[in-house]
Amino acid sequence: MLKKEYLLSLKIEIPYGLINKVLKMKNKLTCNYEDQYIRNILDKTKNIAMIGLSSSWQRPSYFVAKYLLDRGYKVFPVNPKEAGKKILNQKVYSSILEINEKIDMVDIFRKSSDIDILTNDILKIKPSTIWLQIGVINCKIDTLAKKNKINVVMDRCPKIEYSRLSGELGWAGINSGTFYNKRRIIRSIMK
Amino acid sequence: MTVPKNNHKFETRTIHAGAAPDPTTGARNTPIYQTTAYTFDSTEHAASLFNLQNFGFIYSRLGNPTVSVLEERMANLENGRAAVACSTGHSAQLLALHPLMEPGDRIIASQNLYGGSITQFSHAFKKFGWHVDFVDATNVKNISKIINPKHKCIFVESLSNPTGIILDIEKISLIANKAKIPLIVDNTMASPYLFKPFDWGADIITHSLTKFVGGHGNSMGGIVIESGMFDWFQSNKYPSMTMPTESYHGLIFAETFGDFGYSMKIRADSLRDLGSTLSPTNAFYFINGLETLHLRMERHCINALKISKFLEKNKKVSWVSYAGLENNKYNKLAKKLMNKGVGPVFTFGLKDGYEAGKKLISKVKIFSHVANVGDTRSLILHPASTTHNQLSDTQKIKAGAGPDVIRVSIGLEHYQDLIQDLKNALSDV
């Protein structure tokens, strides 16, 4: 992905307005998803394997898993370092191939460069969706998944997308970019 | 992740962004949630709210459903990522700086800030060990000349009060970018209708909502908005953002909350501890105000141009400083940055100086003599003896508030009545 820092490092006086325009265009090409596309994925998904889920509660992945569990999704932590233990009361697997249930979505908390090693295993279990977290973009998995008719979402977070589309994100003053003229029912499954 | 694309035009967003019919009652307008606390579903739910793991309301010091509609709407209108509202514009400036500054740190600020800001920066902030270097930012080289690693941010006004000076935010943002520090722009006087600092490279915006956002001179409020584009990890200058926060069991805000980490830090830490919360009733007035922002700003600018042209030709007026006038030295920059207009606040001087100015203020019948701007009513003021009174004489002149300066904020009355009012009063001067 084109970075602002790279453009600035060129040491030519590029007007900032132009930099932003270039960045926006570039992002539009790689990670532009219609709200309806994301909504369908979140609506049809039930079981989510989370690769790289941390057991420490301050970590972003832990926040996401906790939120998704609260929203009624089943979360399958995948983390070789924590295999056999439990995170958020869910059994941790060392590989996604060990999970016996049908996985609808694989959500990956790993660097863009780590994705290549995981690609084969992920394609083997044929999930409906492969989801890469914010800042994670890998064109190879994007192309391969699309060939296999698997949905791909990159550079996004399912927690932020869920809360954005359900209206909760705005509660923290965050710009959701969405309008509603009807009453929204927020699906909440608190035990 | 980037700021969500805005599919709608600005005018549509002023009315709809951030709001939705009430989920329980279907109430179409945003209700005033006049409540201090919110029920928890369970102790588990309470814990995840306190740990910031879930979105939701705990206590109105930290967030309120009416206030959050305003916050999202302002973030949307400024093409930003997230916002935190607070009790006043002054408070917004304190909250904006709080996560960035440590004792001993420095700020570069424009010398043409609003007088109240200059006092806040040079006296109140000094007590925290925050030091300010004021510069004439109309020449951006003055910023590059003094910038050093102790500077944690650059703070300027897009359109300055009362001088109407326009700064080249684009050029200043390049300097801030190279120094890896955020550019904070007070966009109060322009409002997002006339100017959007994020589109020109700013990283953080502050507003006094009291002015054009409210627009009717009825409520006090402020807001901090973040672009979501600033990379906190590019240096080790901002430990509050990039190091574990003790009061949240070691949470790293810039990591966990990514492009809205700064807003979360302000809300969960600065607003929680400094306590300058916006009341839901005031938020309601601002939400209503925003719905006509585009109409009001357009008319404010039309009226201001007519009145500045009238004053320019009046024999008792020695000078008019309004960037909307062709001969003004900021007119060229105004056309580049603010092509819809430069707002209705400007200054002028009378040939007979201070005494004549005092007389004019006492003679007008429609213009009100008050210390405010951005009202539906036309306002007139002598800054040197009021808003800029606490400044030294040199500071006053530097801030464009010398003894002969009269400031007006042109309202939404018919311009012919306003011209007649000034004409009558000037004839007595």
Image: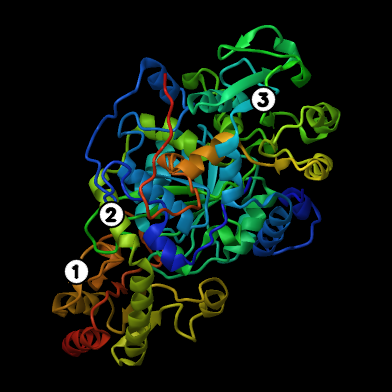
Name the residue nearer the viewer: B112 or B233: B233
- Chain under disc 3: A
Q: Look at mark 2 in the image and give the residue it sits on.
A: B29
Q: Tell me the number on the disc at residue B16.
A: none
Against B223, residue B161 (above or below) is: below
Q: Amino acid at mark 3?
A: Met
Q: Tell me the number on the disc at residue B369.
A: 1
Q: Amino acid at mark 2?
A: Asn
Measured as percent of width and height from the top left, residue A133 is found at 67, 35
Q: Tell me the number on the disc at residue A50.
A: 3
Against B335, residue A123 (above or below) is: above
| Placement of the C terminus of chain B among the 4 image quadrants | bottom left
> Quadrant location of residue B274?
top left
Regarding mark 1 in the picture, which secondary structure is present there?
A: strand
Regarding mark 3 in the picture, which secondary structure is present there?
A: strand
Circle 3 or circle 1, nearest the eye: 3
How far apart are labels 1 and 2 at the CA level?
34 Å
For the residue carrying disc 3, how many other residues have a C-alpha within 10 Å: few (<14), some (14-19), or many (20+)? many
Q: Is residue B405 left or right of residue A144?
A: left
Q: Is residue A74 left or right of residue B70?
A: right
Which residue is found at the position 61% from the left and 52% from the top?
A: A34
Name the residue nearer the viewer: A103 or B282: A103
Which residue is found at the position 64% from the left and 20% from the top?
A: A76
How far apart are labels 3 and 1 at the CA level?
63 Å
State whether residue B170 appears in this view.
yes
Task: Pick out the residue farthest to the top.
Answer: A84
Measured as percent of width and height from the top left, residue A149 is found at 76, 43
Measured as percent of width and height from the top left, residue B144 is found at 65, 55
- Chain under disc 1: B
Name the residue nearer the viewer: B422 or A167: A167
